[in-house]
Amino acid sequence: MPGKTPVIAMVAAGVFGVAAGGWPIVTARLGGESGPSMRTQLASVLDDQHWATPKPGSWTMPQPAANGLPPVIRSIQTQDRVVFLTIDDGYTYDSEFVNLVRKEKVPILTFLTSTYIKGQGQYFWAMRNAGSQMENHTVTHPNMATLSAEAQKKQICDSSEAITKQYGHRPQIFRPPFGSYNQTTLQVAKECGIKSVLLWSAEFYNGTSGPGVGYNGFARGDGGKGFKPGDIILMHYRKGLAQEFQMILGWIRQAGFRPAAVQNYLPRSLGGNAPDQPSHA
Protein backbone atom coordinates (compact mmCIF):
# COMPACT_ATOMS: atom_id res chain seq x y z
CA MET A 1 0.00 0.00 0.00
CA PRO A 2 1.49 3.41 -0.95
CA GLY A 3 2.93 5.46 1.88
CA LYS A 4 3.61 2.65 4.34
CA THR A 5 7.16 1.71 3.41
CA PRO A 6 8.75 4.88 4.90
CA VAL A 7 7.01 4.22 8.22
CA ILE A 8 8.31 0.66 8.34
CA ALA A 9 11.80 1.81 7.46
CA MET A 10 11.81 4.46 10.16
CA VAL A 11 10.56 2.14 12.88
CA ALA A 12 12.83 -0.71 11.88
CA ALA A 13 15.81 1.61 11.82
CA GLY A 14 14.99 3.18 15.14
CA VAL A 15 13.82 0.07 16.96
CA PHE A 16 14.82 -3.22 15.37
CA GLY A 17 18.03 -1.99 13.72
CA VAL A 18 19.68 -1.17 17.01
CA ALA A 19 20.06 -4.86 17.77
CA ALA A 20 22.71 -5.01 15.08
CA GLY A 21 24.36 -1.84 16.28
CA GLY A 22 23.43 0.05 13.13
CA TRP A 23 20.56 1.68 11.30
CA PRO A 24 19.65 -0.44 8.24
CA ILE A 25 17.49 0.75 5.37
CA VAL A 26 14.47 -1.49 5.13
CA THR A 27 12.75 -1.94 1.79
CA ALA A 28 10.18 -4.60 2.67
CA ARG A 29 6.61 -3.60 1.90
CA LEU A 30 3.39 -4.37 3.70
CA GLY A 31 1.05 -6.53 1.75
CA GLY A 32 -0.75 -9.81 1.50
CA GLU A 33 -1.21 -11.80 4.68
CA SER A 34 1.73 -10.17 6.46
CA GLY A 35 -0.12 -6.85 6.91
CA PRO A 36 -2.04 -7.49 10.14
CA SER A 37 0.92 -9.26 11.73
CA MET A 38 3.23 -6.35 10.93
CA ARG A 39 0.73 -3.82 12.27
CA THR A 40 0.55 -5.79 15.49
CA GLN A 41 4.33 -5.82 15.77
CA LEU A 42 4.58 -2.10 15.11
CA ALA A 43 1.91 -1.35 17.69
CA SER A 44 3.82 -3.31 20.31
CA VAL A 45 7.10 -1.45 19.76
CA LEU A 46 5.57 2.00 19.36
CA ASP A 47 3.28 1.86 22.38
CA ASP A 48 4.59 3.71 25.41
CA GLN A 49 5.79 1.43 28.18
CA HIS A 50 3.51 1.24 31.19
CA TRP A 51 5.47 1.14 34.42
CA ALA A 52 4.12 0.17 37.84
CA THR A 53 2.45 2.98 39.75
CA PRO A 54 3.03 3.51 43.48
CA LYS A 55 0.46 2.26 45.96
CA PRO A 56 -1.79 5.00 47.39
CA GLY A 57 -0.37 6.36 50.61
CA SER A 58 3.14 5.00 49.97
CA TRP A 59 4.64 8.33 48.92
CA THR A 60 4.28 12.06 49.47
CA MET A 61 3.44 13.79 46.23
CA PRO A 62 5.70 16.73 45.33
CA GLN A 63 3.83 20.01 45.51
CA PRO A 64 3.76 23.08 43.23
CA ALA A 65 5.92 26.01 44.30
CA ALA A 66 4.19 28.82 46.16
CA ASN A 67 5.43 31.37 43.63
CA GLY A 68 3.84 29.54 40.70
CA LEU A 69 7.17 28.67 39.08
CA PRO A 70 8.27 25.09 38.37
CA PRO A 71 9.33 23.48 41.67
CA VAL A 72 12.84 22.07 42.01
CA ILE A 73 12.75 18.38 42.99
CA ARG A 74 15.81 16.45 44.23
CA SER A 75 14.21 13.26 45.54
CA ILE A 76 10.82 11.67 46.16
CA GLN A 77 9.52 11.07 49.66
CA THR A 78 8.42 7.44 49.62
CA GLN A 79 8.19 4.40 51.85
CA ASP A 80 8.93 2.11 48.91
CA ARG A 81 12.48 0.83 48.42
CA VAL A 82 12.69 2.38 44.98
CA VAL A 83 15.22 4.58 43.23
CA PHE A 84 14.85 6.53 39.99
CA LEU A 85 17.43 6.25 37.20
CA THR A 86 17.94 9.30 35.00
CA ILE A 87 20.47 9.66 32.17
CA ASP A 88 21.72 12.97 30.76
CA ASP A 89 23.21 14.39 27.57
CA GLY A 90 23.46 11.99 24.60
CA TYR A 91 26.83 12.73 23.01
CA THR A 92 27.70 9.05 22.70
CA TYR A 93 25.66 5.89 22.56
CA ASP A 94 25.85 2.16 23.14
CA SER A 95 23.54 -0.05 21.08
CA GLU A 96 23.97 -2.89 23.58
CA PHE A 97 22.46 -0.62 26.21
CA VAL A 98 19.15 -0.36 24.34
CA ASN A 99 18.87 -4.13 24.22
CA LEU A 100 19.69 -4.36 27.92
CA VAL A 101 17.04 -1.81 28.91
CA ARG A 102 14.45 -3.60 26.80
CA LYS A 103 15.40 -7.02 28.17
CA GLU A 104 15.54 -5.95 31.81
CA LYS A 105 12.45 -3.70 31.48
CA VAL A 106 14.02 -0.90 33.50
CA PRO A 107 12.30 2.50 33.63
CA ILE A 108 14.62 5.39 32.80
CA LEU A 109 14.11 9.09 32.25
CA THR A 110 16.38 10.63 29.61
CA PHE A 111 17.29 14.31 29.78
CA LEU A 112 18.32 14.86 26.19
CA THR A 113 20.59 17.64 24.99
CA SER A 114 18.74 18.21 21.75
CA THR A 115 21.74 19.08 19.58
CA TYR A 116 22.48 15.35 19.52
CA ILE A 117 19.19 14.56 17.80
CA LYS A 118 20.74 15.55 14.47
CA GLY A 119 23.38 12.83 14.52
CA GLN A 120 21.78 10.24 16.79
CA GLY A 121 18.04 10.77 16.52
CA GLN A 122 17.35 7.14 15.61
CA TYR A 123 19.27 5.91 18.64
CA PHE A 124 17.01 7.89 20.93
CA TRP A 125 13.97 6.62 19.05
CA ALA A 126 15.17 3.17 20.06
CA MET A 127 15.62 4.37 23.65
CA ARG A 128 12.14 5.88 23.63
CA ASN A 129 10.66 2.59 22.47
CA ALA A 130 12.64 0.67 25.08
CA GLY A 131 10.80 2.75 27.66
CA SER A 132 12.77 5.94 28.23
CA GLN A 133 10.77 9.16 28.04
CA MET A 134 12.66 12.15 26.58
CA GLU A 135 12.79 15.31 28.67
CA ASN A 136 14.58 18.67 28.33
CA HIS A 137 18.31 19.22 28.96
CA THR A 138 18.76 22.35 26.76
CA VAL A 139 20.08 22.58 23.20
CA THR A 140 23.84 22.86 23.77
CA HIS A 141 24.40 22.15 27.51
CA PRO A 142 25.47 25.61 28.78
CA ASN A 143 25.71 26.82 32.37
CA MET A 144 22.26 28.38 32.50
CA ALA A 145 22.91 30.71 35.44
CA THR A 146 25.52 32.56 33.37
CA LEU A 147 23.13 33.35 30.48
CA SER A 148 20.70 36.18 29.85
CA ALA A 149 16.97 35.56 30.09
CA GLU A 150 16.67 35.56 26.30
CA ALA A 151 19.49 33.04 25.87
CA GLN A 152 18.09 30.77 28.59
CA LYS A 153 14.65 30.82 27.04
CA LYS A 154 16.06 29.92 23.65
CA GLN A 155 17.96 26.97 25.13
CA ILE A 156 14.86 25.56 26.80
CA CYS A 157 12.15 26.39 24.25
CA ASP A 158 14.18 25.33 21.21
CA SER A 159 15.08 22.03 22.89
CA SER A 160 11.44 21.33 23.69
CA GLU A 161 10.44 22.08 20.10
CA ALA A 162 13.10 19.72 18.70
CA ILE A 163 12.19 16.88 21.06
CA THR A 164 8.48 17.32 20.38
CA LYS A 165 9.02 17.24 16.62
CA GLN A 166 11.23 14.16 16.76
CA TYR A 167 9.59 12.04 19.47
CA GLY A 168 5.98 13.23 19.71
CA HIS A 169 6.14 14.22 23.37
CA ARG A 170 6.60 17.81 24.52
CA PRO A 171 8.94 17.91 27.52
CA GLN A 172 7.39 19.15 30.74
CA ILE A 173 10.34 18.29 33.00
CA PHE A 174 13.64 20.16 32.79
CA ARG A 175 17.12 19.42 34.12
CA PRO A 176 19.62 22.30 33.93
CA PRO A 177 23.15 21.27 32.93
CA PHE A 178 25.48 20.96 35.93
CA GLY A 179 22.42 21.54 38.13
CA SER A 180 23.01 25.27 37.62
CA TYR A 181 19.97 27.56 37.53
CA ASN A 182 18.56 30.81 38.92
CA GLN A 183 15.14 32.44 39.23
CA THR A 184 15.35 33.52 35.61
CA THR A 185 15.79 29.89 34.60
CA LEU A 186 12.61 28.91 36.42
CA GLN A 187 10.67 31.81 34.93
CA VAL A 188 11.63 31.14 31.31
CA ALA A 189 11.22 27.40 31.83
CA LYS A 190 7.60 28.03 32.78
CA GLU A 191 7.16 30.16 29.66
CA CYS A 192 8.45 27.20 27.62
CA GLY A 193 5.87 24.84 29.12
CA ILE A 194 8.08 23.26 31.77
CA LYS A 195 6.19 22.17 34.89
CA SER A 196 9.01 20.96 37.15
CA VAL A 197 12.80 20.94 37.44
CA LEU A 198 14.26 17.57 38.36
CA LEU A 199 17.73 17.51 39.91
CA TRP A 200 19.21 14.50 41.75
CA SER A 201 20.15 13.20 45.18
CA ALA A 202 22.97 10.87 44.10
CA GLU A 203 25.28 10.37 41.12
CA PHE A 204 26.78 7.28 39.54
CA TYR A 205 29.94 8.53 37.83
CA ASN A 206 29.68 5.94 35.07
CA GLY A 207 32.60 6.04 32.67
CA THR A 208 34.42 8.73 34.64
CA SER A 209 35.79 9.55 38.09
CA GLY A 210 33.86 11.36 40.79
CA PRO A 211 35.38 13.46 43.56
CA GLY A 212 36.38 11.17 46.39
CA VAL A 213 34.78 8.06 44.89
CA GLY A 214 37.05 7.19 41.97
CA TYR A 215 36.20 5.69 38.58
CA ASN A 216 32.62 4.40 38.27
CA GLY A 217 32.03 5.67 41.78
CA PHE A 218 28.74 6.42 43.49
CA ALA A 219 28.24 9.53 45.62
CA ARG A 220 25.30 10.91 47.54
CA GLY A 221 24.65 14.62 47.64
CA ASP A 222 24.08 14.47 51.39
CA GLY A 223 27.41 12.78 52.02
CA GLY A 224 25.84 9.50 53.12
CA LYS A 225 26.39 6.01 51.80
CA GLY A 226 24.31 3.66 49.70
CA PHE A 227 20.78 4.15 48.46
CA LYS A 228 17.81 5.75 50.17
CA PRO A 229 14.14 5.33 49.20
CA GLY A 230 13.21 7.90 46.60
CA ASP A 231 16.74 8.66 45.41
CA ILE A 232 16.96 10.29 41.99
CA ILE A 233 20.21 9.00 40.49
CA LEU A 234 22.14 10.87 37.81
CA MET A 235 24.01 9.00 35.07
CA HIS A 236 25.30 9.99 31.62
CA TYR A 237 25.28 8.54 28.11
CA ARG A 238 28.93 7.50 27.80
CA LYS A 239 30.85 4.64 26.19
CA GLY A 240 30.49 1.38 28.06
CA LEU A 241 27.08 2.32 29.42
CA ALA A 242 25.66 -1.20 29.08
CA GLN A 243 28.25 -2.76 31.39
CA GLU A 244 28.05 0.15 33.81
CA PHE A 245 24.27 -0.08 33.87
CA GLN A 246 24.49 -3.77 34.74
CA MET A 247 26.83 -2.77 37.55
CA ILE A 248 24.46 -0.29 39.17
CA LEU A 249 21.46 -2.57 38.65
CA GLY A 250 23.36 -5.20 40.62
CA TRP A 251 24.08 -2.73 43.42
CA ILE A 252 20.45 -1.62 43.53
CA ARG A 253 19.07 -5.14 43.71
CA GLN A 254 21.65 -6.35 46.22
CA ALA A 255 20.59 -3.50 48.50
CA GLY A 256 16.97 -4.62 48.27
CA PHE A 257 15.83 -1.76 46.03
CA ARG A 258 14.33 -1.64 42.55
CA PRO A 259 14.24 1.00 39.81
CA ALA A 260 10.90 2.76 39.37
CA ALA A 261 9.51 5.37 36.96
CA VAL A 262 9.86 8.80 38.55
CA GLN A 263 7.17 10.25 36.28
CA ASN A 264 4.65 7.99 38.01
CA TYR A 265 5.49 9.70 41.32
CA LEU A 266 4.95 13.19 39.90
CA PRO A 267 1.46 14.69 39.56
CA ARG A 268 0.25 15.78 36.13
CA SER A 269 0.48 19.41 37.24
CA LEU A 270 4.25 18.89 37.56
CA GLY A 271 4.68 17.00 34.29
CA GLY A 272 4.17 13.47 35.60
CA ASN A 273 1.52 10.80 35.24
CA ALA A 274 -0.02 10.67 38.72
CA PRO A 275 -3.42 12.26 39.35
CA ASP A 276 -3.10 15.55 41.23
CA GLN A 277 -5.52 14.21 43.83
CA PRO A 278 -4.47 10.57 44.33
CA SER A 279 -7.11 8.06 45.24
CA HIS A 280 -6.90 6.39 48.63
CA ALA A 281 -7.23 2.68 49.18
Image (tube, grey):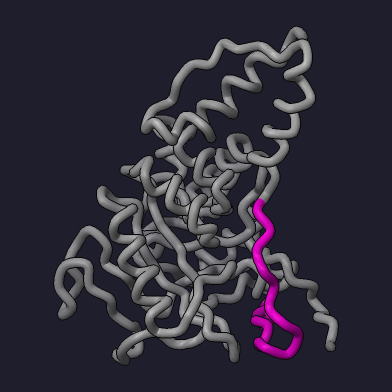
The picture quadrant where one finds residue 70 is bottom right
273 horizontally vs 244: left or right? right
Query: Residue furthest toward the top?
Result: 2
Q: Would you say the magenta stretch is mainly helix, strand or loop? A: loop
Q: Residue at the front extreme?
A: 33
Q: Write the residue at 56% across / 71% down.
A: 260
Residue at 73% from the left image edge and 19% from the top image edge = 34
How many numbered circles does the render carry? 0
Q: Residue at x 38, y 28 (%)?
A: 22
Position above or below: 165 against 67: above
Is residue 230 in view from this perspective?
Answer: yes
Residues in magenta, as a range: 49-67
Q: Is residue 186 left or right of residue 275?
A: left
Q: Which quadrant of the rendered structure holds the C terminus?
A: bottom right
Q: Quadrant of residue 105?
A: bottom right
Q: Could you tell whether 67 is left or right of 158 in the image? A: right
Q: Does the magenta-highlighted stretch encompass residue 139?
A: no
Q: Residue 14 placed where, x, y %?
A: 52, 32
- The reply to whether the magenta stretch includes residue 53 is yes
Give the image location of residue 109, x and y in percent. 52, 59
In this rendering, the answer to whether 135 lies above or below 34 is below
Q: Nearer the viewer, residue 137 or 101?
A: 101
212 and 227: which is toward the camera: 227
For image coordinates 44% across by 34% down, the residue present is: 18
Closest to the observer, 124 or 31: 31
The quarter of the rendered structure image containing the N terminus is top right
- Nearest to the observer: residue 42 or residue 74: 42
Residue 51, position in %: x, y?
Answer: 65, 63
